[in-house]
Image (cartoon, rainbow, N blue to C red):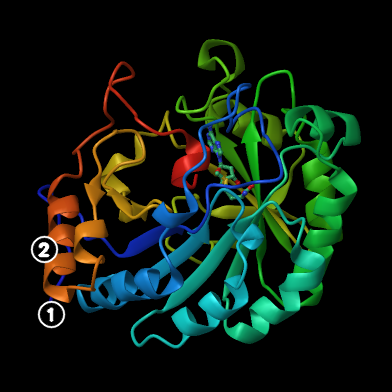
């Protein structure tokens, strides 16, 4: 059985694919005030190039893919990309991370095209805080997206909440959300790759768990579907939804890291927190070269750091350019 096993024995099974660097929100934990330089259209991978990468990746042992961005639903033709990906042999799990705004139109077509799971980033349920955090976003639009995802039959719909001290660390409204909808709320540690100062805003998951405990009793909701890092979920007794925490910094999750990231301009990132990238373009243009793609995929896996690169290391791109 072929496989992508790195130097410390981790088997790489998951590929996160950023399909655009554009987004209509400007979340403060994701984008710097001044914005980021957007890629030229010609540099962004075409769908047939993404499919070519995916075909090789599947042969090498990747089994799960997540589309992300920027905002993936802003990219024209995303439903047809999902349809083509879903038809690829060996893809066990196909998911997408979105801000939810376009889901009222797209949730049903995406589900019909074969998308398995959806994550929606909603970092506050307070209208004003949401507007402030996203620099102008409308919470009502995101919530309409969430309802559309539930109505289209996605189970669970995961809700990403990047916890920021003093801003959105009141967890009670999110617990109410789990009482109302079959969603899985995931409280995520803010990663220092974002533009707001960690010293001031970082909330460790241990603290979030303490806050959660005050709202118990809870029952076990089991391990969440997918290939991601969330811990076992819990639910309020009788609630349709559940919640979990994701320790992206404090829990040193590197030992369990099973993923590679593909940027929208065709660079594989072995690690979110290291600026090292492997450019796949030479294996895609002017024509697809599956053997070279395979070699580059293995090169990226071999470059996965064993542990978290230190804070001073060059991280290259920001979260909006890599895909969260
Ligand atoms: N536009 C989509 C969205 O809003 O979810 C997809 C792209 S966004 C970069 C993907 C996810 O990255 C977000 O849902 C958010 O949870 C996460 N994210 C962004 N910046 C982060 C940070 N500094 N720390 C932890 N998570 C972050």
- Using the image, tell me which numbered label, if any, was put on residue 163: none
* Left or right position of 112 against 46: right
Residue density around tag 2, few if under 14, some if 14–19, many if 20 or more, within 10 Å? some
Residue 22: give x, y in percent of width and height. 59, 47
Q: Specify the farthest residue to the top.
A: 199
Q: Which mark is residue 295?
A: 2
User: Ligand 1 is in which quadrant of the figure?
Assistant: top right
The quarter in which the N terminus is drawn is bottom left
Q: Which mark is residue 1?
A: 1
Q: Quadrant of residue 33?
A: top right
- The residue lying at 25 percent from left, 43 percent from top is 277
Q: Quadrant of residue 310?
A: top left
Q: Is residue 70 or residue 44 the one in the foreground?
A: 44
Which sits earlier in the primary sequence, circle 1 or circle 2?
1
- One can see residue 239 in this view: no
Depth order, front residue of 18/194: 18
């Amino acid at each position: 059985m072929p496989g992508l096993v790195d130097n410390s024995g981790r088997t790489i099974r998951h590929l996160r694919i950023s399909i655009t660097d554009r987004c209509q929100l400007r979340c403060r934990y994701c984008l710097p005030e001044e914005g980021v330089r957007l890629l030229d259209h010609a540099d962004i991978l075409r769908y047939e190039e993404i499919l070519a990468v995916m075909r090789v990746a599947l042969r090498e042992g990747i089994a799960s893919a997540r589309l992300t961005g920027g905002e993936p639903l802003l990219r024209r033709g995303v439903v047809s990309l999902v349809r083509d990906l879903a038809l690829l042999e060996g893809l066990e799990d196909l998911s997408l991370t979105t801000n939810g705004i376009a889901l009222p139109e797209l949730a049903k077509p995406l589900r019909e095209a074969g998308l398995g799971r959806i994550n929606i980033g909603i970092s506050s349920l307070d209208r004003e805080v949401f507007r402030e955090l996203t620099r102008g976003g409308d919470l009502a639009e995101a919530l309409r997206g969430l309802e559309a995802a539930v109505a289209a039959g996605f189970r669970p719909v995961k809700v990403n909440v990047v916890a920021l001290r003093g801003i959105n660390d009141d967890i009670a409204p999110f617990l109410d959300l789990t009482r109302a909808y079959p969603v899985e709320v995931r409280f995520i540690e803010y990663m220092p790759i974002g533009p707001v100062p960690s010293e001031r805003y970082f909330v460790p998951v241990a603290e979030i768990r303490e806050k959660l405990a005050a709202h118990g009793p809870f029952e076990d909701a089991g391990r969440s579907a997918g290939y991601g890092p969330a811990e076992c979920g819990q639910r309020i007794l009788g609630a349709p939804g559940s919640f979990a925490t994701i320790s992206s910094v404090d829990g040193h999750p590197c030992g369990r890291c099973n993923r590679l990231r593909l940027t929208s301009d065709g660079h594989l990132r072995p690690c979110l927190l290291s600026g090292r990238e492997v450019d796949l373009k030479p294996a895609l243009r002017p024509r697809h070269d599956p053997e070279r793609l395979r070699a580059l995929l293995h090169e990226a896996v071999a470059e996965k750091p064993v542990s978290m690169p230190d804070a001073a290391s060059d991280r290259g791109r920001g979260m909006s350019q890599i895909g969260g």
